[in-house]
Image (cartoon, helix red, strand yellow):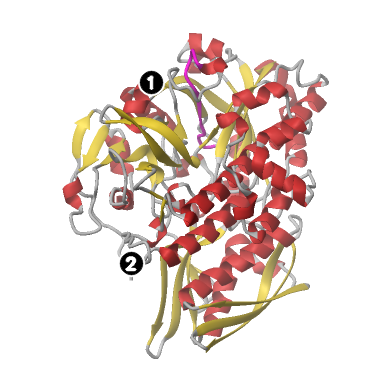
Amino acid sequence: MIQIPTTRPPLKRISEVIWEISPDYKKDAPAMQVPARIFATEKLLNQMDFAVFEQISNVACLPGIQKAAMCMPDAHWGYGFPIGGVAAFDTDVGVISPGGIGYDINCGMRLIRTNLTAEDVKPKLKPLVDHLFKTVPAGVGAHGFVKLTAQQHKDVMLDGAQWCIKNDYGWPEDKERIEDYGRIDGADPSKVSAKAIKRGAPELGTLGSGNHYLEVQLIEAKNIFDKQLAKKFGLFENQIVVMVHCGSRGFGHQICTDYVDTFRHKMASWGLKVRDEELACAPFKSKEAQDYFAAMNCAANYGFANRQLILHRIREGFSHIFGQDAEKLGMHLIYDVAHNIAKIEEHKIDGKKKELVMHRKGATRCFGPARKELPKIYRETGQPVIVGGSMETGSYLCVGTDEADNLTFGSTMHGSGRTMSRAAAKRQIYGTDLQKKMEKEGIYVRSTSMSGLAEEAGVAYKDISEVVDTMDIAGVSKRVCKFQPLGNVKG
Amino acid sequence: MTKGKSGKFNFLDKLVTADIAFEAFGKNLNQLFENAALALNEAMVDTKTVSAKAKKIFKLQNAQLNNLLIDFLNEIIYYKDTDSMLFSKYKVKIEQKDKLWKLSAEISGDKIDWQKHKLSADAKAATWHLFELEQKKGKGWRAQVVIDI
């Protein structure tokens, strides 16, 4: 029987919001190579399940890991890596681990602005949300509205969101406002199984379910924390924006399943021992690792394309309800970020630049103005960082900092993180009651599953403000504004 | 723990936060796999609302029994996504031959219909997280599986 930890390892507080587990905590092989670092206020630290500390210290044992294995303040336990886990590996001697990216490859967030105000939208909120519920496919078994040929599916794997834009599902400017311009090089469809392709093809352009959603949101005056930056991002008080949270659907999941299986069977031959089955990994230079990375990039591109198609439907929906085209409504994409991904990035280790395989699982890139990866439009401000909260408590826009490079390899939180199990949430809350309660509070929700809705209640999540404040205090990502939910579509 | 179908499976509420975990039982391997399939589908839908209209028949094999169970559950998830189906009846036969575990399965269900089916979570993968598979002398088989949703 597997033992769930009942105690926390010794923690050393190294700054107001940074705590460290010494490499001495696990000295027997496979031993910790680096410390584990947890970013959290004391309150969030005390809320973290004990398994998070075990998991992140297990990650610190992986070969080639650099500097520290890190946990973001929204961390909770996951497969191998905790969700909210960040780890960087030397490309020569390090590994790649699908558990450090997550099953839902390139799950991520997208933020879209409008010229509309609360007064424009509130009288039409119900028809707007109802229309988006009808036109953006969501929920178990939903299929997308774009029917792809086999060749087109391959093109999506290679070109991501740029395929969509070329085929009139977007504006040319959109690609500049997506991480990696919506298309990651190094994707290879021949490394993706027939099963993944068959699973992915019908689901492109669908929202999914669980904690995935699209949300119509409002910026109240009191929730703009940096007026100058907000203005530079095209945001203003009383403005309506739209946020999307979804990933690569069954396509990414199947790729992860396929390669975890491949790696598990080969680890002994590579002489790799890990403390947890789900930390299955491969030497990055091995053929199997390179195959996985190429397949992962296909899923990453699929995720960008998925959110691009959903944006297309959102623009159409707003146009339909408000009787103006989306350009006149000012529906520019602000940014799209991935929060389950591995990237090759250059970072400084002991003052020297090094190429690393960055793993971010439930963690968002937050580059400052100095990073060349950012598009021209954000080289002055730093990267927009979109942080999704629960459908009751709201979400945030933050901005990346140059200091983040030194502290977290340019990484920050992705959301608020769950504190309550899905079953516990359903025992406390009925979906229909929650829906009525939220409507009384001015939030209109449509969902394909009432029990799924109950699972996503605000009480099941950490306090997102505390999570965001942690990384603001640390200097990693700074708050720009907070968004109040008005309308939500869930699968 | 939430009691599932008596003697067949239970949901393990306290084991995981963001996902679903269950333990399934069986006097023999065939029953264990059938009850694991039931637990998986019950995580997604009230299977009483799913008629057994269409069949999927498939075979799998693996050198490791634990891998076979994970593969079996992921095969059901695969059909759920490719064919938009959920399943309520399962017939599984497992035998060991030439150092390989061989499975043949016939699962029956229906196309997903939000109006007809009482839907809950969407299972995306059976994982190795906290996975257990054991045979207790005189008590039959038990499996513990975490489903990513």
Q: Residue at x 50, y 50 (%)?
A: A290
Q: Is residue A205 visible?
A: no
Disc 1 sits on a residue from what chain? A
The kind of residue on which mark 2 rests is: Ile
Disc 2 sits on a residue from what chain? A
Residue B5 position within the rendered picture, expressed as x and y whole percent measured from the top left = 55, 74
| Pointer 1 local density, CA inside 10 Å: few below 14, some 14–19, many at least 20 | some
Which quadrant of the view contains residue A80? bottom left
The Cα–Cα distance between marks 1 and 2, rounded to whole angstroms, is: 42 Å
Front one among A221 and A341: A341
On screen, residue A310 versus residue A443, left or right, reads right
Check whether the beta carbons of the residues at disc 1 and disc 2 lie within 8 A of each other: no
Label the magenta part by its dominant secondary structure. loop
Residue A238 position within the rendered picture, expressed as x and y whole percent measured from the top left = 60, 15
Residue A356 position within the rendered picture, expressed as x and y whole percent measured from the top left = 39, 38
Which quadrant of the view contains residue B106? bottom right
Residue B111 position within the rendered picture, expressed as x and y whole percent measured from the top left = 76, 63
On screen, residue A91 versus residue A112, left or right, reads left
Q: Which mark is residue A402?
A: 1
SS class of the residue under badge 2?
Answer: loop
Quarter in which the N terminus of chain A is drawn: bottom left
- Judged from this view, the residue extending furthest toward the top is A228
Q: Residue at x 63, y 81 (%)?
A: B104
Same chain for the residues under marks 1 and 2 in the image: yes
| Segment tinted magenta in the rendering | A379-390
Residue wearing tag 2: A2
Q: Is A342 rendered above or below residue A404?
A: below
Q: Is A46 rendered above or below residue A120?
A: below
Q: Is residue A482 visible?
A: yes
On screen, residue A100 versus residue A455, left or right, reads left
Q: Residue at x 78, y 72 (%)?
A: B53
SS class of the residue under badge 1?
Answer: loop
